[in-house]
Amino acid sequence: MMRIALGLQYDGSPYSGWQTQVNQHSVQDELESAISAFIGDACKDSPIKTITAGRTDAGVHALGQVIHFDTHIEREDFSWVRGVNSFLPSSIVVNWAKQVPEEFSARFSAFERTYIYALHAGPCRSPMVHSRAGYLLLPPNKYLDIEGMKKSAQCLIGEQDFSSFRSSECQSKTPVKTMYSVEIISQEPWVYFKIRGNAFLHHMVRNLVGCFLQIGQGRQKPEWMAEVLAAKDRKVAAPTFMPDGLYLAKITYPEEFGIPAPWLENSWLPSQITKP
């Protein structure tokens, strides 16, 4: 047996999320079907089962998703890319493939994850980025308080209990995660949130964005974010914001595994993400 890692991008809008679910259409279903089709009869006695770095929700996209699977089939790296892509729908693509050591795990070897949320805020939505960006209705000549949102983010940095931003369906063993950085960039009418941490809870990024927007619209003071964090109670935070603008941008691994960086690493601003 050998272990193969793949780097993926996908538009999550047609899918129920990454993970296989009964009577649902998932990214995992499409990928495993494509790998099996590429391998052919050789996989009948050993069905393909993929392990992912991050289980994205319904409607959430990926620019730097990483998965691995085990197989006894030998192929050149680019043969995996070309072959699997030939069986995938246009909404999913394999960017790279690499044989990795047995101790590599797409999930457990990762030590850092980066998410980007792309938000369009203004009096009219943009039909050109439907399902690919979040939208917030703002009256004409009204703008988000970017500096207030940046100030509110300071309390999130470091090891924290993020229970207030945790979905009731979250399966993580602990709500304690480490946040490394939060960047908020305004390019009106666009606002981009780039959030980097060791791991994330279910709906955590979307719940954080919801709270940022309460502050950005002046409904709460910047200090409110610290109060929400300290409460450790999901009921005190803002509603979960829409999935459309959320992108799993990058997964980081120890250098010895030689995992390629995603194409977006040095050019993540959403003209790259949201252009039609």
Image (cartoon, grey):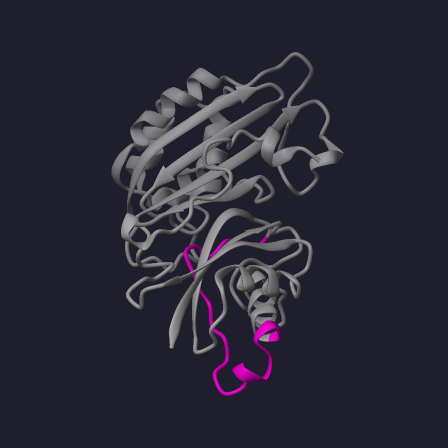
Task: Tell me the residue at 71%/36% (across/down).
Answer: 276
Among all residues in the image, which is located at the extreme front? 76
**Residue 77, position in %: x, y?**
48, 61
Q: Relative to 100, is 156 above or below?
A: above
Q: x and y percent of residue 216 in the render?
A: 50, 22
Q: Is residue 125 magenta?
A: no
- Residue lying farthest to the top in this orientation: 141
Q: Is residue 240 left or right of 252 when viewed as pictured?
A: right
x, y percent for residue 125 = 71, 30
The image shows residue 28, relative to residue 200, as above or below, that is below
For the view shown, which residue lies furthest in the right direction?
A: 127
Numbered label tally: 0
Residue at 57% across, 19% down = 187
Q: Is residue 230 visible?
A: yes
Residue 219 visible in the picture: no
Question: Residue 30's spot in the image, x, y percent?
Answer: 61, 66
Q: Using residue 146 as the reference point, say whether residue 136 is left or right of it.
A: right
Pick out the residue farthest to the left. 159
Q: Write down the region rendered in magenta.
A: 37-58
Instruction: Say whether residue 54 is magenta.
Output: yes
- Residue 95 vs residue 114, the one in the foreground: 95
Identify which residue is drawn at 38% across, 30% down: 182
Dividing the picture into quadrants, the one containing residue 188 is top right
271 or 236: nearer the eye?
Answer: 271
Q: Nearer the viewer, residue 269 or 35?
A: 35
* Quarter in which the N terminus is drawn: bottom left
Front-most of residues 68 and 242: 68
